Image (cartoon, rainbow, N blue to C red):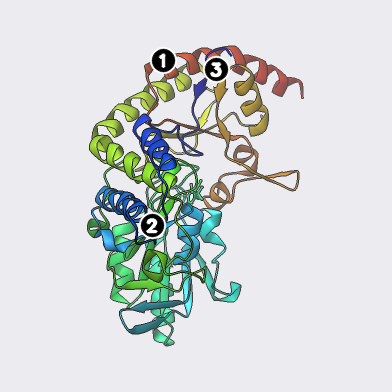
Amino acid sequence: MSERTYLDHNATSPVRPEARAALLDALDATGNGSSVHGEGRATRSTIDTARRRVAALVGADPRGVIFTAGGTEADTLALTPDYQRGEEALAFDVLLVSAVEHAAVLRGHRFPADRVEVLPVDARGRVLLDALDAALERHAGEGRRALVSVMLANNETGVVQPVAEVARRAHAHGALVHTDAVQVAGRMPVSISDLGVDLMSVSAHKLGGALGAGALIAADPDLRPAPVFAGGGQERGRRAGSENVPAIAAFGAAAECAAACAEADAMRIHALRERLESALRCEFPELVLLVGDVDRLPNTSCLALPGVPAETVVIALDLAGVAASAGAACSSGKVAASHVLEAMGVPERIARSAIRLSFGWSSGEEDVDRAIGVFRRVVPGLLRRRAAA
Ligand code: PLP
């Protein structure tokens, strides 16, 4: 196959060599982590090593890490009205989420739909703190306790949310705070205590681990969401089911690599993204950068050729060797404009043209060069088709 340029790390990143080695080692081992024999104890030790590494990635206590099957399950586990802190039961009456959350959060999961309140965002996609304050005050005034879930950075635009400020305001009203850090953990330094959140979701395959592992991390190891699965006592009774040890081992190895180079990688990747964006904007004035002048992930570009459907651009790029992604979601054969761009007030014609380019740990200068070359080959044809339509 001719050389490909992979610019879809926000969908999934390639598995790091260290993670692959850890996965294969774990596959070769026999033993259930719940068994008391030597094989079982070796598996338990593999899981505990991974737990320490994942905890270290975000500066958490390893006892707060609950391994799951990915970011979606971590979000699902977090979004429940029923918690316990030690022996004390905590009940939440309402869930507050931002309008730009991933679908894994937006649906509210175990909260009934009429107890989920969606907070608006500004034109750059940041949650409106005044709206958060108003909702917190209203619910507290009426005796309702809130769980707040605001993502650390958006998967489509890369826009970073003021999560530390959200946590400060929410805690002042006695609320509990969860953040979906799936797109950030392993890509930029993250500290659960600096953010001041109670719970954080992370996912292995976004940071160079294997698909099929993630974690919900509680800042206080005694804080426990009601489990989703009933069964054995794995994960200290917080997530039943024999652990996916190979994926967890790979997650730990990837987390350790990512933690060691998150800062340097973020700078390197930022430079790649900036070079691509400035070349594209200079050569194709028709291209619109949908989010620019705002705190955003160093790896993500959200662009549009207004009037050219996103899927047409993505297919043309794919045929020419660049893997990118449409900012629009496709369900039941109908391409819908992204709820994220809609919440930001981006006009529908532009939103339907939005594509996402996202770099990651394996990206290099050659990816930028090849992507620029492919845009040069593809964009003039797309513009001619647009003019003829
Ligand atoms: N949250 C965000 C922000 C995401 O981008 C994704 C995946 O794209 C998820 C949650 C779901 O994670 P997973 O694919 O590990 O279930």
Three-letter residue code for mark 2: Gly
Looking at the rendered structure, the kind of residue marked 3 is Phe
Whether residue 1 is visible, yes or no, is yes
Q: Callout 1, which amino acid? A: Glu
Mark 3 vs mark 1, CA separation in Å: 14 Å
Q: Is residue 71 above or below residue 174?
A: above
Residue carrying label 1 = 366
Looking at the image, tell me whether mark 2 or mark 3 is earlier in sequence order.
Answer: 2
Instruction: Say which of 315 and 64 sits in front.
Output: 64
User: In the rendering, which numbered label is found on residue 33?
Assistant: 2
Q: Secondary structure beneath disc 1? A: helix
Q: Which residue is mark 3?
A: 375
Earlier in the chain: of badge 2 and badge 1, it is 2
Identify the secondary structure beneath mark 3: helix
Q: The residue tagged with tag 2: helix, strand or loop?
A: loop
Residue 249: image tag:
none
Would you place residue 97 above or below residue 366 in this image?
below
Using the numbered discs, state the Cα–Cα distance from disc 2 to disc 3 in whole angstroms: 50 Å
